[in-house]
Image (cartoon, rainbow, N blue to C red):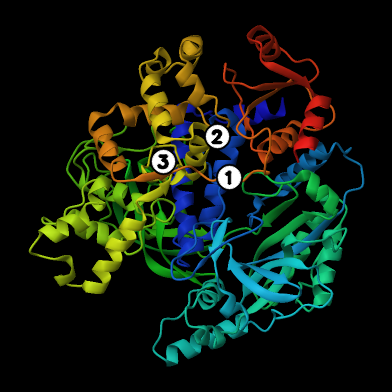
Amino acid sequence: MEDTQKRNDVSEPSEEEVRKQLVELATQIRAANIAYYTNDDPQISDAAYDALVKKNKKLEAAFPHLIRADSPSHQIGATAATGFSKITHSSRMLSLDNAFDKEDVEGFDTSIRKFLGLEQDAKLDYTVEPKIDGLSLSLRYVDGVLVQAATRGDGTVGENVLANARIVSDIPDRLIDAPQVLEVRGEVYITHEDFAELNERQQRAGAKTFANPRNAAAGSLRQLDPEVTRSRPLRFFAYSWGEVSRGFARTQFDAIATFQSMGFKINKLTQLAQSVSQLLAQYEQIEGQRASLGYDIDGVVYKVNDLNFQQRLGARSTTPRWAIAHKFSAERAWTRLEAIDIQVGRTGALSPVARLTPVTVGGVVVSNATLHNEDYIIGQDSQSQSIRDGKDIRPGDWVQIYRAGDVIPKISDVDISKRPPDSRPFTFPTSCPACGGAAIRKENDAVRRCTNAMSCPAQAVEKLKHFVSRGAFDIAGLGGKQIEMFYNDPTLPVHEPADIFLLQSRDQENQSKLADRDGWGETSARNLFAAIAASRKVTLDRLIFALGFRNVGEVAAADLARHFGSWERLVETVTTAAREPAASVRAEKQRKDFLNESPNWLEITSIDGLGDAVADALINRFSDRFERKAMDNLIGQLEILPIARLIVADSQLAGRMIVFTGSLQKMTRAEAKASAERLGAKVSSGFSKKIDIVVAGEAAGSKLKKAQEMGITIIDEDQWLELIRSDS
C-alpha cells in the first residue's frame, strides 16, 4: 500500500518512457565509468554520477520488469587500460551498491535479514568504515611474498602494476604467518598535504597539475616508469581480501585486525554497529571528521561482520549483498554557462552538453555538464511537470552545479537575476547538426533522434568508435581520432566495421601509403595492421557488444552468447523470430497471446534478465537489409570463438535451463538463483519447451501444471539442495 501511495503521489511515466530513460542512463553511466576507471579522466562529478545511479535504481525498483540486461547495476568499473600487461583476478573485484539516505540504509538492513531469514530484532553486527576516495588495488602474496599487484579494471581483468606497488611504503613485500595464498585488497590514496606538495613540484617543473588526490594517486600508480611512481607519495589502506588458501578470521572486524598484525595500515575509524540507528550515528560522526582527516573520503561503508553470513549472502552480478556504501551529500558551486553544444550519438540521439566557465568545486575543476534532453533545458520533466520552478536554461546564464567527487556535474538551479538582458531561450534543433537530416522526437520519447541512420556521418563514426572500444574489439592504435581520420580518408575509407579488416590489403594497393602520412610511420602502421589482424579472433560476447545493438550492453551480450553458443544460432533464431506474430505486435497483452505460436521470440525474451527491448533491438537490426549486409561483410573477416564459462568444473547443471516456482522454505529465491548460476545453469523467468528442470516449492501454480503437461523434469526443494550439494 505504501509503495502504491508513493507512486501515486506523482504522475507515473509510461513504460515506454521508462525504457527510454533506462537506455539513456545506461549509456551515460557506462561512459562515466570508462572515463573514471580506465582513463583517470572523469567527465562528470560524483554528484552527477550518483544522481544517475540513484535515478536508475529508483526506476528499476518501480518497474522491475523493465530492468535492462546492460543495466549499470550489472557492471563493475571499466576495462583495463593499455600499456600494462593484463591480470585476470582469481576472485572478481566487485563494486559496492550505494545508499543515499536513511531509507536506503534501512532497506539494506531489511534485505539482509530477509535473505538470511532473520527476525528484525535478531542480533546482527556490521562494520562501519570510511570509504576512501582512491584507486582499488589487489595484492597477491604466495608463501608470504608479494608476487602480484593488479588494479580493479573491469572487476575481472586488471592491470599488472607490481613494480609500482613495491614502491608504496605502506605495502609490505613479505608477510609473517600468512596463509599460503592471500590476496589483500584495499585503496591507494594521497593525503591532502602530500597532494599540495606534489602539485607545487609539478608547477615548478612546468608539468600538468592534478585535479584532485584521487586522480593523482591513480595516475601515479599507473606510471610505466616506476621511478615516476617513486617520486609520488602514495599510501595504502587494507580493508578486504580476494582468494585465500585458508580461513584466517571469523569476522570482518577480526580480519582487518589481522591485516594490521601482518604489517598493513588499516583505517582506525573502523567500528562495529548493531542497529540501523548506530550505523547512521557513526556515519554522522565520520562525516563530521571529514574535513580534518587529511585524505579524501566520499562516504561510509557498512559490511555484515560475520563471515559465514557474508558467504551465505554472496553477490549479485557486480556487487556483494553484504555491503553497501553510504555516500555523502553533494557539493555545490555557481558558474557561467558559456554555450550549449549538441552531440550526436551512435543511435542518433541528440544530447545537449553545457560548456561552463571552469570552476573548482571541492578541489576539482569542472567545465562540462549534462543537460539530459530538451525538456530538461526548458525546465520540465518527462511528464511536463516543472523542475527548477520552471526556469529554463540559456547560454549566458549563471547556473548552480553540484558534485561530490570529480566528474561532470549536473545543473541544479539558475539565477534569473543575473540573466543577460539580451538573453534568448535556447532553441533545440529539429535537424541533425551533423548531417542536416530530420531530428524527430517520437511520442513518449525523451530523446530527439536523427532519422538519417544510414548516411549520418556522426552516427557512423560513433558506431565505429564503439566497435573498436575496449569493451568491444579493443584494437590498439585505433581510437576515436584514428576512426575519424579513416572515415574521411578517400583512399583508405572505413565506413563500416568490415572496412577495418581490409585496411592492410587496401594500403598495399595504394600508392599513398599509411606509413607516409603525417603522424604515422613504418612502425606505427605495422603495429596497427598487426593489432587488427590479432583482433580477427573474437569471442561471441564481444562481437555482439561491439555491434552496438540498442539495449544490449556487455552483460546482455554475454547472456546472449552463453545462451545461443554460436553466431549462426543467434542469427537463425532472431531472423526466424522476426517472421513470428509477436515480433510485430507492440501491445503487451496482445503479444502474450502470440507467444505460444512464437517459440523463437519466446526463447529470446525468456533469457533471465533480458526481455522485449532486447528482442526488438536484435530484430530491428537483423531485419534492415543494409545493416544485415554490413554484419555479413564483417563476419566473413572474423573467427568467432565461444564465450568462456566461469562455472564449477564438471557441473552436471552447466547449460541447463531452470525455472523456480512456488514458495521455497529452506533458502530464499535469491539464494536458489545464485546457486544455479554458480553451477552454470540458466535461470529462466519465462516458460517454454526448452526448460530442463522445474524446481517446485510450496503452492506452485501454473508453471508446475505446464511442466506436468509437457513432461518436464520436476523436483522439490530438498531434491534441488541435494543436487547442488553433489555438484559443488
The residue drawn where x is 38% and y is 43% is 373
Q: CA distance from mark 2 to mark 3?
A: 19 Å
Instruction: Kindly indicate whether the residue at mark 1 contacts the one at mark 2 (C-beta within 8 angstroms).
Output: yes
Quadrant where the image shows the N terminus: top right
The percent coordinates of residue 459 (x first, y second) are 27, 45
The percent coordinates of residue 636 (x first, y second) are 28, 41
Residue 2 sits above or below residue 102 on the image: above
Task: Name the one closer to the observer, 223 or 453.
Answer: 223
Is residue 494 something one can see in this rendering? yes
- Amino acid, disc 3: Ile
- Amino acid, disc 1: Ser
Give the residue number, with chain letter if any, for mark 1: 73
Give the residue number, with chain letter if any, for mark 2: 67
- Amino acid, disc 2: Ile
User: On the rendered structure, is 421 left or right of 236?
Assistant: left
Q: Secondary structure at mark 2?
A: loop
> Which tag is nearer the camera, tag 2 or tag 3?
3
